[in-house]
Image (cartoon, grey):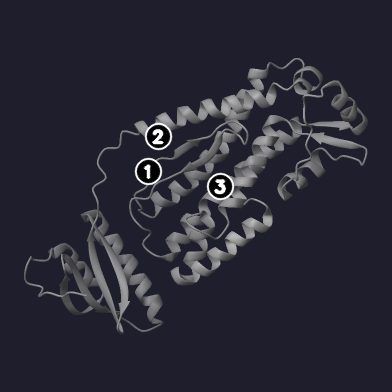
């Protein structure tokens, strides 16, 4: 670590005064071009708790002036660095809009192909235009992912973290026509509490949206005698009937709204399939690995080093679950 004297260039009084307001400064110095302070906490109590509150207060003070704090523990001392916050500028959202439009098209195509099978078209929903089913499928699946990402963004804004609007990800038809959506953080969370809230907010918001849409989707689904399904398999040999494992939340809702006997099957409406995709994405997102939401949550609880071990366990869980 390279140190220079604190005399040149001159430190900005804005962050100097803020640091002195919240910490006892042992020594200011320049770490190359980064203003840094060796600091101690004030008051009585658990040192890490005092540091967390002081650091959060400092971040709140200097963020509006274009600075971000960073704290490190080096050789028995806290080293507090002040980083320049990147200017956000005026965002055009052109890329967001183009990706959203592309995702609408791919999801709509997926929904159309899914709704255009002859069993739905001729037997179960003869009076409903295929394009109507495709449209409500598109609205359902995009709503699930939008609520998930705006859950993240709400917490980011509330915590003062500069974050983008959602970027939707189009995909070929087959698994819903989309790989979901992401938001981009332009700066790190101020502490583990903010990281935890940020990681958990999306899955909770998305789960609530998925559960509500699941009620609609399962209500629109069809209970059909097994013998009738067997007959349709003969009448429509080009259609592949596939038994899909139901996520717990959908199983619970179906047992209340559309219970079936041993001689019946539940054929999912396209909206119900949208919720199935939503449940799948939520599950994968909660795997405690990489930059997934589960990874953020676990990293906020156990720290960066322990998170590497948990990430390996998360990959093994994906393999055992059959998703890899």
Secondary structure beneath dot 1 equals loop
Using residue 243 as the reference point, say whether residue 187 is left or right of it: left
Secondary structure beneath dot 2 equals helix
Q: Position of residue 312 (x, y in %)?
A: 55, 65
Q: Position of residue 46 (x, y in %)?
A: 41, 82
Tell me whether the residue at label 1 lies in contact with that at label 3, contact meaning CB atoms closer than 8 angstroms.
no
Q: Residues within 10 Å of mark 3 (few under 14, many from 20)?
A: some
Q: Position of residue 243 (x, y in %)?
A: 79, 40
Residue 190, image quadrant:
bottom left
Dot in front, 1 or 3: 1
Is the residue 104 above or below the residue 38 in the image?
above
- What residue is shown at x 31% (from left), y 70% (from top)? 71
Dot in front, 2 or 3: 2
Using residue 146 as the reference point, say whether residue 269 is left or right of it: right
Using residue 265 as the reference point, say whether residue 270 is left or right of it: left
Is the residue 195 above or below the residue 281 in the image?
below
- What residue is shown at x 71% (from left), y 48% (from top)? 249
Q: Earlier in the sequence, mark 2 or mark 3?
A: 2
Number of callouts in the render? 3
Question: Which residue is under mark 1?
Answer: 164
């Amino acid at each position: 670590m390279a140190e220079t004297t604190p005399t040149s260039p001159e430190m900005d009084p804005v962050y100097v005064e803020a640091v002195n307001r919240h910490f006892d400064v042992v020594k200011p110095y320049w770490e190359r071009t980064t203003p840094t302070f060796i600091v101690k906490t004030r008051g009585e109590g658990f040192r890490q708790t005092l540091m967390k509150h002081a650091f959060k207060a400092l971040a709140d003070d200097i963020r509006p002036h274009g600075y971000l704090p960073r704290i490190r523990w080096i050789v028995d001392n806290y080293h507090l660095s002040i980083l320049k916050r990147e200017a956000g500028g005026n965002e055009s959202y052109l890329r967001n809009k183009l990706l959203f439009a592309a995702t609408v098209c791919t999801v709509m195509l997926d929904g159309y192909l899914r709704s255009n099978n002859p069993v739905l078209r001729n037997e179960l929903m003869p009076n409903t235009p295929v394009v109507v089913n495709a449209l409500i499928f598109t609205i359902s699946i995009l709503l699930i992912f939008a609520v998930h990402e705006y859950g993240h963004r709400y917490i980011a804004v509330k915590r003062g973290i500069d974050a983008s609007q959602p970027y939707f990800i189009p995909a070929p038809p087959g698994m819903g026509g989309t790989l979901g959506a992401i938001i981009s953080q332009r700066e790190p969370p101020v502490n583990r509490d903010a990281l935890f809230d940020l990681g958990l907010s999306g899955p909770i918001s998305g789960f609530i949206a998925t559960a509500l849409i699941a009620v609609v989707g399962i209500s629109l689904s069809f209970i059909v005698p097994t013998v009738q399904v067997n007959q349709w398999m003969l009448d429509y040999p080009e259609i592949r009937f596939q038994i899909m494992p139901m996520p717990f939340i959908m199983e619970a809702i179906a047992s209340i709204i559309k219970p079936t006997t041993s001689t019946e099957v539940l054929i999912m409406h396209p909206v119900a399939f949208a919720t199935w995709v939503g449940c799948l994405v939520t599950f994968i997102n909660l795997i405690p690995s990489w930059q997934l939401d589960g990874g953020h949550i676990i990293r906020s609880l156990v720290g960066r080093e322990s998170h590497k071990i948990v990430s390996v366990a998360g990959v093994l869980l994906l393999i055992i679950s059959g998703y890899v």
